[in-house]
Image (cartoon, rainbow, N blue to C red):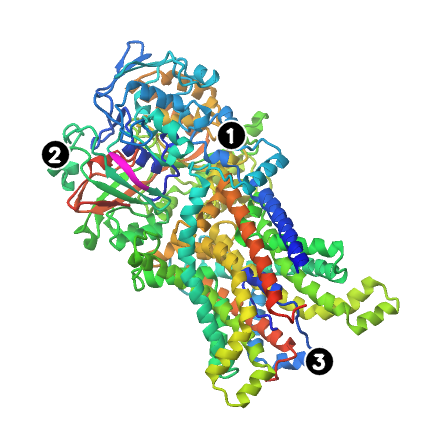
Amino acid sequence: MDGAPVNLDPAQASDLYTKFLVVNLYDTLYRYKYLARPYELEPNLAEDLPQVSPDGLLYTFRIKPGVRFIDDEAFPDGNGRLLQAEDFVYSIKRHFDPATRAQGAWLWQGRIVGLDEWKANGAHYDEEISGLRAVDDRTIQIQLIAPFPQLTHTLAQGFAAIVPREAVDYYGREFAIHPVGSGPFRLSRFDSAGASLLRNEDFRAEPFSLQEEGYNPITQGAFGLESLEGKILPLVDRVDIEFIAEDAARWTTFNAGQLDFIKVPVSQFDQVLKNRNPPQLVDELAGRYHLLTSLESGFVYTVFNMDDSRIGYHPDPDQAVRNRALRCAIIKAFDWKRRNEIFYSGLGKVFPGVIPPLTPEYDPGQDRNSVTRDVADAVSLLNNFGWNPENLPTLEYGLPSSVTERQMFEQFRSFMSAVGYPQEKIRPLTFATYGDYARAYINREVMLITSAWTMDYPDAENTVQLFFGPNATPGTNTANYNNAEFNRLYRASSSMQASPLRTAVFHKMNRIVIDDCVAISGISRTLVMLWNRNVAMLPDREFVGGYFFRFVGVTDTTDREH
Amino acid sequence: MNSAPLPPLDLRIATAMTSRVLSAPASRVWPRLRRDHAGLAGFGLVGLFGLIALGAALGLAGQDWSIASGGRWEPASTMHWFGTNVLGQDIFQRSIHSVRLAFEIGLIVALASTAIGTLTGALAGWHADSWADDAVVFVTGVLDSIPFYLFVAAVAFALKGNPWSMHIAMVATFWTTTSRLIRAEVMRLKQRDFVQAALAMGMPVSLVLSRHVVPNTIHILLAQAAIVFVAAIKSEVILSFLGLGVQNGVSWGLMLAESTQEVLAGQFNNLLAASIPLFLLLFGFNLMVDALQNALDPRQELG
Amino acid sequence: MLGYLLRKLLHSLLLILGVTLVSFALMVYFGPDQTYKLLGKSASTEHIQEIRQQLGYDRPFIRRYGEYLGDLFTLQLGASNSNGEAVSDILKRTLPVTLALLVPGFILGNVLGVALGLLAAWHRNRWIDRIISSASIAGMSTSFLIIIIVLQVVLCTPYGLNLFPARGWQVTGLASYLNYVTVPSLSLVLITLGYNTRFFRAIFLEESGREHIRAARAFGASPAQLMGRHVLKNSLPPLLTRVLFSIPLVIVSGSLLLETYFGIPGMGKITFDAITNGDQPVLKAVVGLTAIMFVMVQALAGMSYRLIDPRVS
């Protein structure tokens, strides 16, 4: 893996690497189908999709019978016990207990009846919550405050993994490195260098069904998946994962034959791919490895801090208009094509606005003015609105310290110099770690904020909420954008189920964001993955990565992962 | 005992061990230096780089280090002597600019740390065993007990993005060695006849220090300054690699950090353009320091 | 003598206090705020406040420092804020790795340095000496980073010999240990060899210039006897002191760079991570223990030097 999880507590499964491991060690009510594209929800621990009341406020779930937690000394006699509906309730309650330091509360905050009050009352676990109840051993009911169409999606998140109370009480803080779950694997090793997963012998015996998982023989036939039909999950006995964040080292290790699977670093794309369209491996690799290129479920973008009157909102309406022109000029001066070529090997997908290609609501026909470079246009914008090298504000571009980020900054600076922006007026604001950077932009100290957003579920609501006024920092709206019309449309759409009508509303919101020149947006990166031909799988890290491990089949006895 | 040039880590070891530094009369030093060919070569190298740095500072060379004028990873050509990096920036220009930055860092840190070290060392050495002396010795002891890179990382955070945080951190660590050496030498010199005579004649202490004592420590100062210069440049390389050093601009450390990602793609230009000049400059400095210390050691046979 | 020892002890304690104060102020008090790393994607002001309070950022300096000293001296090291692992467990896990990583290179670097230094001192000013001296100056003039990068390219990549793994530490037995420790050890040797040789050569030169050595040489003693018995033995005090002194420095700084570059889960790496993340319990433990180690080593070395070498006043 190109990164390492810090710990394995589902309450802290906010980054990709943690999610990867958490969904294999624990059970969630739902997951995504292994092979279906676009992504579809599939019951995991739940028996079926939920029963929803006509007003959309009451959800009922039934969980499968006979599911057990693994044996662990946290349990009274060392034997894992049956998983019950109450465990799910407990796991969600944990997110609202300050002692957990959970990171997932935002998914359900203000949505479930009684949950926020439970927290305010002192977070006592024995207290019942009216909107989150275990009706019996296998039935769960959730009562919402307002319709929340994405609720089921949130239950496929790593955050929604089900943990036993005994283990949390027994291990305390160390629970984070001592997982006790009911998932298809158990943990046999975990440190900063890597982790090993062993098959959980007590995992509920479910056979692999190609059809159920949405198999498409035309696009997926080459991966050898058909031979695995009918076998009991998980299909492999052991998975060894090495955490190698440095591209160079990861590639070298893979090349030395020590890894079966790798997400290829961008710097190697040229060496690995013979063609781009359609993607093909060079001959010496084609015989040994499978290749998969797929778009990420997220995007990289830069926002302007609208709270900063030098570039964003301004009490004087004329100045506000001038600021907008400046922002638009900067966006027009940005060369997405070159950015794509240099840093993503030309394989990224540039798109206008904030609804990325992997969402169902993506509009391929949208006009691409906002991502097409036009230096003349930018210059005229600056001139017409009275901007010149003397009165241009100093742009402070925030970045976490790393070689690539610094190079991206220098490239940004050179883009701007083409429209006459003085080099000394574009300054880097570097931070030693991402946490430090986050602190700064949460406190609104950064003028230009570049970040990547990974989507939590395949629904554009997850990306448009990035510009919803009330979500301003410390929420996810790092631009601190606040547009009344946008906010109104967002509120209207939030109770709508996915439909062409709602998609039209999203498109309208997208155009508002583009017109206001709030962000230089965006690009979805393409992942290139290679794996040994004796491993039959379709790897996937989108939305909630890692569910595919249980479907990995190998002709060797072990499988070593990127 | 001859105190050989040491890495930044070992500056403190050297001083703890050498409580006596020997000096030779000035009249014998200069001819010795002239005869030391290696030392002259070193001096020449340093001078050459110094001129380059000056030229860069005056705007004569290395100005276009941040302009993306070429394609990605172009090989060496007449237009780009070392080719271009991933953004299309001229690597040779970047290296020239790095010379200037290296001298900037080296000079500032060397001068500042030598100044502070001399002042505190003289104070402590003159008033040996007083509370001032104890205070200085205590502070040097404390600072020496904090691991260097941890200290610099911490200072970089505490100064939150101040462009001088790296310099300040380096000065704060490097002055202690000079201080110890000066202190020892001043303690020695204070016992010497000519100093005692001056005091007996009623010369004010400040004058004695500035006219008789400190000038006789110049040899230590010069050698230490050069050692600190080398240490500062080497530290900058590592710090920039770790992300704690130069933030805005280009330096050899940043070029090397870039190169670590590129060598896998078979791109060695950044590595070469940064390591070769860096090596030559440091080599020159070390030769110079060596020559200086050999010349100042009265027990060395001539030739 | 007893009075001297007591004074030294008091002095060391004061030093430890001073070091912990400075380190605490710098790294913990002014250090990075770990709150934001623990926040996740979306946070509320209330959430931020909760975490800050839990991590203790809202308490005054004196109180935090006092608690720190108390925890340190009762060895209550707590658990990491990042992943909940007990700090004592972290130390138990990482210290052996760091030692296993550094010891071979350290010993080899010093042994080779002594050997080359002896050789150079014996053939003083002749061509062997010149070669060794120039080579050591060259070694001192090469940035540590360059040595590491070049070694890695030459030994671990297809552009070179591709004999060893580029990084990692999957040590299960002697063979795998040798596999992973070779390149970092080689780097450590090359990094320190220039300095070591230079220093030892200087010591041996000084020693071999002495009257009794010249006399022994005049009497026809063989090189081996001279260098081995007389020079080496008499040089032991400064030699050993120097080696002793360099131990804490090599452990902390050497481990930091090598572990970060080669991805070895040792003390240097977790310390650095703790500093940049602001993980207070880990930081406090490492800072405190390093301070104690440094101060002790300095005190011991100073004392032993004084004891062994009567010439020093």
On the picture, is A133 further left or further right than A470? left
Chain letter, disc 2 residue: A
On the picture, is C162 further left or further right than B11? left
> Is C250 placed above or below A145 here?
below
The disc label shown at residue B27, or none: 3
Residue nearer the viewer, A397 or C84? C84
On the picture, is B170 further left or further right than A401? right
In the rendered structure, which amino acid carries the disc numbered 2? Answer: Glu
Tell me where residue A520 appears, x and y as whole percent. 43, 36
Residue nearer the viewer, A366 or C250? C250
In the rendered structure, which amino acid carries the disc numbered 3? Answer: Ser
**Which residue sits furthest bottom?**
C219
Which segment is the magenta one?
A185-189
The disc label shown at residue C54, or none: 1
Pointers 1 and 2 within a single chain:
no
The answer to whether the residues at label 3 and label 2 have Cβ atoms under 8 Å apart is no
Tell me where residue C269 appears, x and y as whole percent. 44, 49
Residue placed under numbered mark 2 in the picture: A229
Tell me where residue A256 appears, x and y as whole percent. 26, 55
Q: Nearer the viewer, mark 1 or mark 2?
A: 1
Chain letter, disc 1 residue: C
User: Magenta-highlighted stretch: main secondary structure?
Assistant: strand
